[in-house]
Amino acid sequence: MSETTFDAPGLSRRNLLKVGLFGSAFLATVGVTASLTGCSASVPAGGFAVLRDSDLPFLRALVPVMLEGAVPGEKMAQAVDSTLQSLDYALHRLSPEMLKLTQQLFDVLALPVTRGPLTGVWGSWEKASAQDIRDFLTRWENSSVGLLKMGHASLLQLVLMAWYGRPESWVHCGYPGPPAI
């Protein structure tokens, strides 16, 4: 019988500290770059309380992919708009620290210098295909980098909670709505 165990290189405390240091430096650089380029401007887009113009291209590309199968094609545009409104409503009620972290995630996804290497989407979000978005989500879901896995989970929860909190989504999943009191 052959041996089937693999010798994986151990992550020493020193290497872990190096990764943490480089990761922190990378995120700080991205944050400074985003703020200097105006990417992280905290001015909400028209009609929104929190979502910014820089967030919308990514979210408008992401939401239809996440809602595939739950929304008929002819109703997708309306579902995307209503989901963005619900998402904005939820983000507006987050604690300041959680909102800041969410906006940093959106900044990393909006900034071209980080979008390509981290997501595999090298062009703009408007030009990304549904398959590009699915590949990006799979890449983050299965990443060995904990921050990317957390980013995937956050995006999934934010978008799906925004959609399934809406009455028009309940028919698809068989929920009759809250009981009448």
Image (cartoon, rainbow, N blue to C red):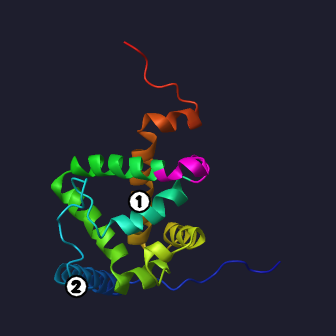
Q: Residue at x 26, y 84 (%)?
A: 21
Task: Indicate which disc, 1 or 2, sits on the residue closer to the N terminus.
Answer: 2
Q: Nearer the viewer, residue 158 or 25?
A: 158
Q: Is residue 171 above or below residue 31?
A: above
Residue 111 horizontal/vertical position (percent): 33, 80
Label 2 crowding class (10 Å Cα cut-off): few <14, some 14-19, many 20+?
A: some
Q: What secondary structure is found at the residue carrying circle 1?
A: helix
Q: Is residue 181 above or below residue 137?
A: above
Report the disc number at residue 155. Answer: 1
Q: Residue at x 29, y 62 (%)?
A: 102
Q: Quadrant of the N terminus?
A: bottom right
Q: Is residue 57 above or below residue 98?
A: below
Whether residue 26 appears in magenta in the rendering, the answer is: no
Three-letter amino acid code of the residue under disc 2: Thr
Whether residue 150 is visible to the viewer of this picture, yes or no, is no
Report the disc number at residue 100. Answer: none
Residue 50 horizontal/vertical position (percent): 23, 56
Q: What secondary structure is found at the residue carrying circle 2?
A: helix
Residue 19 horizontal/vertical position (percent): 34, 84
Whether residue 76 appears in magenta in the rendering, the answer is: yes
Residue 152 horizontal/vertical position (percent): 44, 63
Q: Quadrant of residue 58?
A: bottom left
Q: Which range is magenta?
A: 68-77
Q: Is residue 177 above or below residue 181?
A: below
Label 1 crowding class (10 Å Cα cut-off): few <14, some 14-19, many 20+?
A: many
Is 118 left or right of 66, judged from the image as shown?
Answer: left
Marks 1 and 2, how far apart at CA: 23 Å
Report the disc number at residue 33. Answer: 2
